[in-house]
Image (cartoon, rainbow, N blue to C red):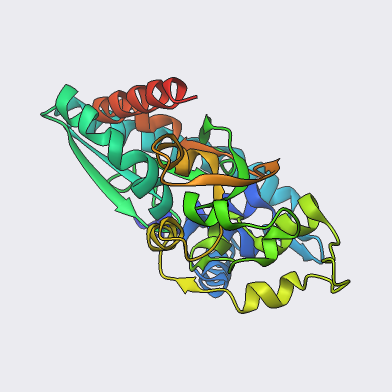
Amino acid sequence: MGKRPLPPLSVLQTFCAIAETGGFSRAAERIGQTQTAVSHQLAQLEGWIGGRLFDRGRSGARLTPLGARLHPAISGVIAELETALYQARASISVRSVAVSVSPEFSSQWLAARLPDFCQRYPDVEVKLAVGYQRPDFQPGGTDLAIWLGRADAGFTHEELLTDEEFVVSSPELSKRLPPRWAIRAAPLLRYSGMRHTILDWQRWHEQVIGESSGEDGVRFDIARAVEEAPFFDSFAEMLEACRQGRGFALVRSSLVARDLSEKKLVRCFVEMQPAAVSYNLVYPPAALLNPAAALFRNWLLAQSHSSV
């Protein structure tokens, strides 16, 4: 009685995010807030305590001795609180799982397999959030996320698929390609999500093909070709245009496996490279206390292994 109210949980989580990522911008990205909001929340906590918790510098934010003493205690309490909340939710037999997934993975890989999960576990509701936004892993938010790249500190990540990157076209277009400088023979298709998927025509061309000139001695201007490339709102729309013979598409192997097996698309060049990052399943460790999340996680890993 008579003590000042404790700082809000969101303020404590922000403090931990800065400590664990080493910077305000990275912490803001991790928790889905602006850098200004992160700074204000830290100022609120430092004002409540009455001392500085971080030294700011060009290399980021470094814990002061006071902050270093405080961080293990706060992060430990938050972890215990998350576990208790997930256990409470599990105790009333939660029968739903919230999954965050990118549009490409949802339409090209997960959609064809999800009916199998629904048939096996008809009493489990799968709530899909499809988009490129960072998932909200707070209790009551996202349970599991499927994304490209590794997890932030404090989260579990399990690799689902190891991809190759290569170029595809329709079979009809492939048959019409000249034996040399074929990359110049059709438009390079793009879509709005390419910046999120680390699929980039210029990077692929420079790393796999390098400098190239045609028989006329004219160097292929990949930057100009990309700038003039037809642009689509989604990966699915770009792939449909590719099936129709409207150009080349740069793809990940896991997203076109069915099209290749059904001969709707073909690999039109021998050049390929390992994908820079893999699809991973990411979640806070306490998420699997939700039985539905544990079921979905086990099913998803089995599906990914069977598709290798």
Residue visible at 82% across and 66% down? 214
Viewed as shown, does residue 289 lie left or right of 285? left
Q: Quadrant of residue 220?
A: bottom right
Q: Can you see residue 51?
A: no
Viewer-closest of 234 and 13: 234
**Residue placed furthest toward the right:** 217
Residue 51: x and y in percent read 66, 62
Viewer-closest of 51 and 32: 32
Viewed as shown, does residue 21 lie left or right of 99? right
Viewer-closest of 237 and 145: 237
Viewed as shown, does residue 128 lie left or right of 42? left
Residue 236: x and y in percent read 38, 57
Viewed as shown, does residue 115 lie left or right of 109? left
Residue visible at 40% across and 37% down? 258
Residue 300: x and y in percent read 37, 28
Q: Quadrant of residue 8?
A: bottom left
Q: Can you see residue 78?
A: yes
Residue visible at 23% across and 28% down? 117
**With respect to residue 106, does 57 lie above or below?**
below
Q: Quadrant of residue 272?
A: top right
**With respect to residue 224, does 126 lie above or below?**
above
Residue 127: x and y in percent read 23, 45
**Residue placed furthest toward the left:** 123
**With respect to residue 75, does 84 lie above or below?**
above
Residue visible at 86% across and 61% down? 211
Viewer-closest of 58 and 179: 179
